[in-house]
Amino acid sequence: MIEFSHKTVLLDESIDALNIRPDGIYVDGTLGGGGHSLEILKRLHGGRLIGIDQDEDAIRATKERLKDFKGSFDVVQSNFENMAQIVKKLGYGHVNGIMLDLGVSSFQIDEASRGFSYMNPDAPLDMRMNRGQELTAETIVNEWPAEELAVLFKEYGEERYAKRISYSIEKERAASRITTTGRLNEIIEGSIPQKALRTGGHPSKRVFMALRIEVNRELDVLKNSIDTMIDMLEDEGRLCIITFHSLEDRIVKQTFRKNENPCICPKDLPVCVCGRRSKGRVVTRHPIIPGEEELERNSRAKSAKLRVFRRVSDKGI
């Protein structure tokens, strides 16, 4: 197995946005290679870091990378949707900052056995971030009805030829089970018109992304977690989220706005009567994106967007 590595995206920008207090409690909900966690720990003096990741390889690698800070952090293998329970179990109430770096890590893409990449033709159709779960990309590709596959590829992958690809998959799996990324690549490529294959990058990119998102429940987990994370923040605490997909970014943007202005009263009412109180302020009216220098170092950062929310008590609003 190759060594776990991950190029941390928007590192300086996200660390600055967290506005770290030396004695604060911080949560990195997506440890990955530990890049954000390392920089947080460098700034703590008496504070504590709680790191969470589904991937056992990330847990192993991060513990080694952060060993010089032993005693200042806790690492838990879990999904960040369980963050509130994890923090409470460790004996903490509220926290001063939360960091999420969504999407798939460089290691997961490059490690063929994980099946995340369309560039590794002999890899199994896996795509699980937590290899303890049952659902895999192979199960979806071989057992979901073609109609449901088409919806998945269209909604999560924004794939133009979703129906053609789905019905080609249905036809091919009737002959034999589709078990490798390479065979799925061939089916996808054979379903797309030759003219379209000449533009838009790799033909499998959108379908693989859609499968990964579904296997790991990425959008549902994000949608169901943001409100809870904001509630976990101390006054002036920050929630920083880096997304790599337009659907993720939309969820973050809309949920942040809703927490800033939750009022549901008709606009013509002179005063609010619904009783819903603002939880804070959106720090980033427009997302922070990587600069040219970072993009030159790391092409995978191209679609990254950072949004930040600042918790503010009722008295401060």
Image: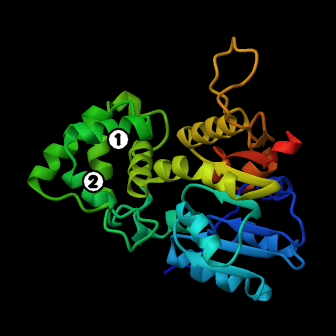
Residue 154, placed above or below residue 88: above
* Disc 2 residue crowd, few under 14, some 14–19, many 20+, Cα 10 Å: some
Marking on residue 140: 2
Q: CA distance from mark 1 to mark 2?
A: 10 Å
Amino acid type of the residue tagged 2 in the rendering: Ile
Of 265 and 31, the residue lying toward us: 265
Residue 48, placed above or below residue 283: below
Of 38 and 9, the residue lying toward us: 38
Residues tagged 1 and 2 counted as in contact (Cβ below 8 A): yes
Point 44% across, 46% down: residue: 205
In this orientation, does residue 138 appear? yes
Q: Which residue is mark 1?
A: 152
Q: Point out residue 48 in the picture as x, y percentages from the top left corner.
A: 78, 76
Of 143 and 232, the residue lying toward us: 232
Point 23% across, 36% down: residue: 147
Point 9% across, 53% down: residue: 175
Q: Point out residue 235 in the picture as x, y percentages from the top left corner.
A: 82, 54
